[in-house]
Image (tube, rainbow, N blue to C red):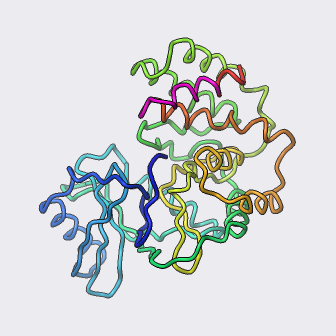
Amino acid sequence: MSGDSCRGVFAAGRACTKHPTHVVSDVSREHLARAVADATGADVVGMTVVHGGDTAAAFRIELASGDVLFAKTHPSPPVGFFSTEARGLEWLRSSDAVHVPRVVAVSDGESGAPAFLALEWIDTRGGRSGDEAAFGRQLALLHGSGAPCFGREDRRTTGSLALPNEPSATWSDFVANCRFLPLARIARDRSALPPDTIDRLERLASTLDRFDDGSPPVRLHGDLWAGNRIVDRDGESWLIDPAAHGGHPEFDLAMMRLFGGFGADAFERYADVRPLLDGWADRVELHQIAPLVVHAIKFGGGYVAASARAVDRYV
């Protein structure tokens, strides 16, 4: 959820200025090339480092077939790391509502093979600015495609903090037990937040019923900051790097507002297609609490005070 967007050629991966060079080696490149070739049935004829996210080494891969892929690998990822992302991408893509890169191959490192995820390449060179209104409409249609539950039926964790996604019947139960309480425990273990802020977060978790409007779960991207939306050279928006799960539609919209990077037309068109519930503006910071606490745990700094202010508003 954090980083600085990069411009120019960009693949289906996180956009930021940092790159984990410590996990890039000739050995890892060779193993990844062999794994991609085995998975696709085509020899790798070109491989270039992509300066992308801070958790995996990323590459632009050219195949003898003429296809171009984005692939990322990690020497020791968490269990199910890449297959969880692949499932999320495929779930979002199956909605037919918004552009999502096609998963070409994925491995969690079974039988000694490298863990990796290979996607179709999305070229942004010389791309126009994204059509904000079109993206707002697509996001509304994505949410409208629904979800079977709050959380995930496969119970897979998401994010670098491995937050749970246990299937839940209500929004309040999901946010309390899969977001606020686990984050409070992590923040306490890591001394990431003041004790009184953690106490108030736990108290808020126990009273979320008063904010639960009974809305059914929708299909969320789950980590919708501007770096996880890329625009191709034709001006079309694509969603990448999801923490996909069933949740409240206001969550994705609150994430979009938290870090900026989305035009007013996106929000206006969204509301035209999928009208917002009364009082939505008063709940924006409520939906921002979990990502703010995640950032406080990971990065500290101003996120600590921002988390406290958001929690205090609703306790």
Residue at 52%, 79% (x, y): give it: 233
Q: Quadrant of the C terminus?
A: top right
Whether 132 is drawn above or below 225: the answer is below
Residue 154 in the image: state x and y as whole percent: 51, 47
Magenta part of the protein: which range? Answer: 297-309
Q: Nearer the viewer, residue 6 or 139?
A: 6
Residue reaching furthest to the bottom: 65
Whether 203 is drawn above or below 18: the answer is above
Residue reaching furthest to the right: 278
Q: In terms of secondary structure, what is the magenta stretch mainly?
A: helix
Q: Nearer the viewer, residue 103 or 293?
A: 293
Tell me if residue 70 is in the magenta stretch. no
Quarter holding residue 31: bottom left
Residue 81 left/right relative to 207: left
Q: Nearer the viewer, residue 164 or 161?
A: 161
Residue reaching furthest to the left: 27
Tell me if residue 304 is in the magenta stretch. yes
Residue 300 in the image: state x and y as whole percent: 44, 29
Quarter holding residue 45: bottom left
Residue at 75%, 26% (x, y): give it: 209
Residue 262 left/right relative to 187: right
Residue 260 left/right relative to 73: right
Residue at 49%, 46% (x, y): give it: 1
Residue 44 in the image: state x and y as whole percent: 23, 78
Residue at 26%, 82% (x, y): give it: 42
